[in-house]
Image: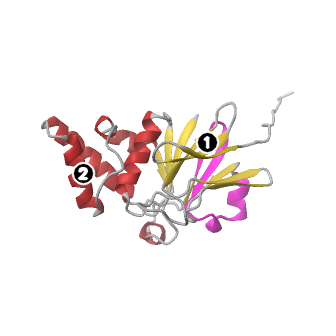
Amino acid sequence: MKVGVISDTHGNIGGFLDAFDLLRTEHEVAKLFFLGHDYKDMDRVIEIKRALRAAKRKDEDPTDFVSDLYDVLAKQEGLHSVKTRDKLEDTEWLKKHTIRVPGDDEDEALFGDEINDKEFELVGGRIVCAVHNPKTLSKEDIASATIIIYGHSHLYQVDKAGSRFFCNPGHLMADVDQGRKPTYGVLDMGESPRFQVFDLDGNVVLDKPLELETKRKFSAS
């Protein structure tokens, strides 16, 4: 099972769209984790895809339409690419298969009674904890998970602490930040678990095997 991991878009809707398209077409992920900052960027992506679908029904040029709409919503110029964007207008997939958490200083985290600042999900038989800032996790949170995926630092990396892995996909800001280009992550929980980080051209910039402990087997006898 593969899941995508995106963090720290900070209003870069074009980067979100590019990463989403690559995750769906090239990596064929089953779920998407969006780790916030900005929490509402996903809602803006859904707006774009809904509008794109409407434009296609009217036989408008999707490339020009998305570029114009992106400029309005994100207030930035240019897109990384639009080669697959006209094929991926499925907003229901985003709403159904995305798990997202807000940054610890976003309004959603401070005032949203129904929005959790961390989420736990079963992925490939392992508990994954998704959080924006790992410093907000309690000892009990960490003890409950095998893999913690997080953002906040804008630096892609994988670290091991005891039997647990901490994985960061880097940032998806429009420009180079912390000396690194925009990137996204893929957590592969197949036969050889690993966490990979890719740039928006699809190049691997980090490939780290996750040496997970063998699951315990229980017997009723």
Secondary element at image label 1: strand
Pick the residue in front: 119 or 74: 74
Q: Residue furthest left?
A: 58
Q: Using residue 173 as the reference point, say whether residue 166 is left or right of it.
A: right
Residue behind mark 2 = 67
Residue 143 percent coordinates (x, y): 73, 55
Mark 2 vs mark 1: in front: 2
Q: Does the magenta segment cover residue 27?
A: no
Residue 162 percent coordinates (x, y): 80, 54
Bounds of the magenta segment: 120-144
CB contact under 8 Å: marks 2 and 1: no
Pick the residue in front: 176 or 58: 176
Residue 17 percent coordinates (x, y): 37, 48
Q: Quadrant of residue 217?
A: top right
Q: Quadrant of residue 150?
A: bottom right
Residue positioned 43% across, 34% down in the render:
25
Residue behind mark 1 = 122
Dot 2 or dot 1: first in sequence order is 2
Q: Does the magenta segment cover residue 128?
A: yes
Mark 1 surroundings: few (<14), some (14-19) or many (≥20) residues within 10 A: few
> Where 137 falls versus 127 (above or below)?
below
Compute the Cα span from label 2 to label 1: 37 Å
> Where 216 falls versus 78 (above or below)?
above
Q: Using residue 2 as the reference point, say whether residue 66 is left or right of it.
A: left
Residue 92 percent coordinates (x, y): 35, 40
Mark 2 surroundings: few (<14), some (14-19) or many (≥20) residues within 10 A: some
**Mark 1 residue type:** Leu
Residue positioned 42% across, 64% down in the render:
10
Image quarter where the N terminus lies is: top right
Image quarter where the C terminus lies is: top right
